[in-house]
Amino acid sequence: MKLNELLLEYLQEEGFRPQVDESDGEIMFKFEGLGFSYMPDENDDLYFALRLPAIYDVDEDNREQVLEACNKTSMGMKVAKVFIVNDKSVWAVFEILFDSTPVMKDVVPRALYILRDTRAAFYQNLQD
Protein backbone atom coordinates (compact mmCIF):
# COMPACT_ATOMS: atom_id res chain seq x y z
CA MET A 1 0.00 0.00 0.00
CA LYS A 2 1.29 3.50 -0.85
CA LEU A 3 2.02 6.13 1.79
CA ASN A 4 -0.91 8.34 0.76
CA GLU A 5 -3.27 5.35 1.11
CA LEU A 6 -1.82 4.46 4.51
CA LEU A 7 -2.10 8.06 5.68
CA LEU A 8 -5.68 8.39 4.46
CA GLU A 9 -6.66 5.14 6.18
CA TYR A 10 -4.97 6.23 9.43
CA LEU A 11 -6.62 9.65 9.44
CA GLN A 12 -10.07 8.16 8.84
CA GLU A 13 -9.59 5.56 11.60
CA GLU A 14 -8.54 8.29 14.03
CA GLY A 15 -11.62 10.40 13.33
CA PHE A 16 -10.04 13.06 11.13
CA ARG A 17 -12.04 14.17 8.14
CA PRO A 18 -9.43 14.32 5.40
CA GLN A 19 -10.19 15.69 1.97
CA VAL A 20 -8.42 14.42 -1.13
CA ASP A 21 -7.80 16.58 -4.18
CA GLU A 22 -8.59 14.17 -6.98
CA SER A 23 -6.44 16.07 -9.48
CA ASP A 24 -3.12 15.57 -7.67
CA GLY A 25 -3.80 13.31 -4.67
CA GLU A 26 -3.09 15.95 -2.05
CA ILE A 27 -4.57 15.02 1.34
CA MET A 28 -5.74 17.93 3.51
CA PHE A 29 -6.99 17.79 7.10
CA LYS A 30 -7.23 19.85 10.27
CA PHE A 31 -5.68 19.25 13.67
CA GLU A 32 -6.03 21.65 16.61
CA GLY A 33 -7.43 24.27 14.24
CA LEU A 34 -4.44 24.14 11.89
CA GLY A 35 -4.63 23.00 8.27
CA PHE A 36 -2.17 20.26 7.28
CA SER A 37 -1.49 18.66 3.92
CA TYR A 38 0.36 15.75 2.42
CA MET A 39 1.36 15.49 -1.22
CA PRO A 40 2.50 12.08 -2.48
CA ASP A 41 5.90 12.01 -4.17
CA GLU A 42 5.53 10.10 -7.42
CA ASN A 43 9.29 9.54 -7.63
CA ASP A 44 9.89 8.30 -4.07
CA ASP A 45 7.12 6.38 -2.35
CA LEU A 46 9.07 6.15 0.92
CA TYR A 47 9.51 9.94 1.26
CA PHE A 48 6.97 11.37 3.70
CA ALA A 49 6.53 15.14 3.96
CA LEU A 50 3.67 16.42 6.09
CA ARG A 51 3.16 20.15 5.56
CA LEU A 52 1.76 23.01 7.57
CA PRO A 53 1.34 25.58 4.78
CA ALA A 54 1.13 29.37 4.87
CA ILE A 55 1.91 30.00 8.53
CA TYR A 56 3.15 33.53 7.88
CA ASP A 57 2.90 36.05 5.05
CA VAL A 58 6.08 37.43 3.48
CA ASP A 59 6.53 40.82 1.85
CA GLU A 60 9.43 43.07 0.91
CA ASP A 61 9.41 44.74 4.32
CA ASN A 62 9.73 41.59 6.42
CA ARG A 63 11.61 39.21 4.09
CA GLU A 64 15.02 39.52 5.76
CA GLN A 65 13.58 39.09 9.26
CA VAL A 66 11.52 36.09 8.07
CA LEU A 67 14.57 34.45 6.49
CA GLU A 68 16.52 34.82 9.73
CA ALA A 69 13.64 33.33 11.73
CA CYS A 70 13.32 30.46 9.24
CA ASN A 71 17.01 29.69 9.48
CA LYS A 72 17.09 29.80 13.28
CA THR A 73 13.96 27.68 13.54
CA SER A 74 15.13 25.06 11.05
CA MET A 75 18.46 24.74 12.86
CA GLY A 76 16.70 24.13 16.17
CA MET A 77 14.09 21.57 15.16
CA LYS A 78 14.37 17.85 14.54
CA VAL A 79 13.06 16.54 11.18
CA ALA A 80 11.22 19.81 10.52
CA LYS A 81 12.10 22.89 8.57
CA VAL A 82 10.52 26.19 7.65
CA PHE A 83 11.03 28.05 4.40
CA ILE A 84 9.48 30.65 2.12
CA VAL A 85 7.29 29.36 -0.72
CA ASN A 86 6.80 31.45 -3.88
CA ASP A 87 8.10 34.57 -2.10
CA LYS A 88 4.68 34.84 -0.43
CA SER A 89 4.39 32.66 2.66
CA VAL A 90 6.27 30.54 5.16
CA TRP A 91 5.58 26.80 5.31
CA ALA A 92 6.65 24.25 7.92
CA VAL A 93 7.40 20.70 6.78
CA PHE A 94 8.06 17.47 8.66
CA GLU A 95 10.18 15.12 6.53
CA ILE A 96 11.30 11.53 6.97
CA LEU A 97 12.17 8.51 4.86
CA PHE A 98 10.17 5.43 5.77
CA ASP A 99 11.47 1.90 5.52
CA SER A 100 9.45 -0.65 3.59
CA THR A 101 6.96 -1.15 6.45
CA PRO A 102 5.62 2.29 7.44
CA VAL A 103 3.33 2.48 10.47
CA MET A 104 1.40 5.76 10.46
CA LYS A 105 0.25 5.55 14.08
CA ASP A 106 3.91 5.63 15.12
CA VAL A 107 4.72 8.74 13.10
CA VAL A 108 1.72 10.98 12.39
CA PRO A 109 0.84 12.05 15.95
CA ARG A 110 4.42 13.04 16.66
CA ALA A 111 4.71 14.78 13.27
CA LEU A 112 1.65 16.89 14.04
CA TYR A 113 3.03 18.01 17.40
CA ILE A 114 6.46 18.69 15.90
CA LEU A 115 4.90 20.89 13.22
CA ARG A 116 2.77 22.71 15.79
CA ASP A 117 5.90 23.31 17.88
CA THR A 118 7.89 24.35 14.80
CA ARG A 119 5.27 26.97 14.04
CA ALA A 120 5.47 28.27 17.62
CA ALA A 121 9.27 28.34 17.48
CA PHE A 122 9.16 30.27 14.21
CA TYR A 123 6.84 32.87 15.73
CA GLN A 124 9.12 33.14 18.79
CA ASN A 125 12.21 33.53 16.59
CA LEU A 126 10.42 36.20 14.61
CA GLN A 127 9.90 38.18 17.84
CA ASP A 128 13.53 37.83 19.04
Image (cartoon, grey):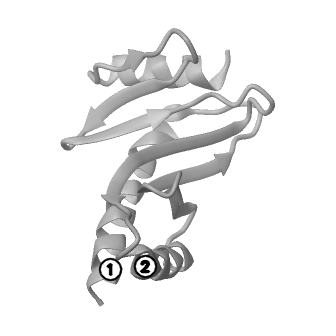
User: What whole-number distance in Å separates the C-alpha atoms at marks 1 and 2?
Assistant: 5 Å
Q: Residue at x 38, y 38 (%)?
A: 36
23, above or below 107, in the image? above
Q: Quadrant of residue 56?
A: bottom left
On the image, numbered disc 2 is attached to which residue?
69
Amino acid at the residue labelled 1: Leu
In the rendered structure, the answer to whether residue 16 lies left or right of residue 49 reads: left
Task: Indicate the position of residue 114 as horizontal and vertical percent values.
Answer: 41, 58
Q: Residue furthest top?
A: 22
Q: Are marks 1 and 2 in contact (CB under 8 Å)?
A: yes
In primary-sequence order, the first of circles 1 and 2 is 2
In the rendered structure, the answer to whether residue 29 lies left or right of residue 102 reads: left
On the image, numbered disc 1 is attached to which residue?
126
Amino acid at the residue labelled 2: Ala
Q: Residue at x 30, y 90 (%)?
A: 128
Q: Residue furthest bottom?
A: 128
104, above or below 116, in the image? above
Tell me the element at label 2: helix
- On residue 19, which mark appears? none
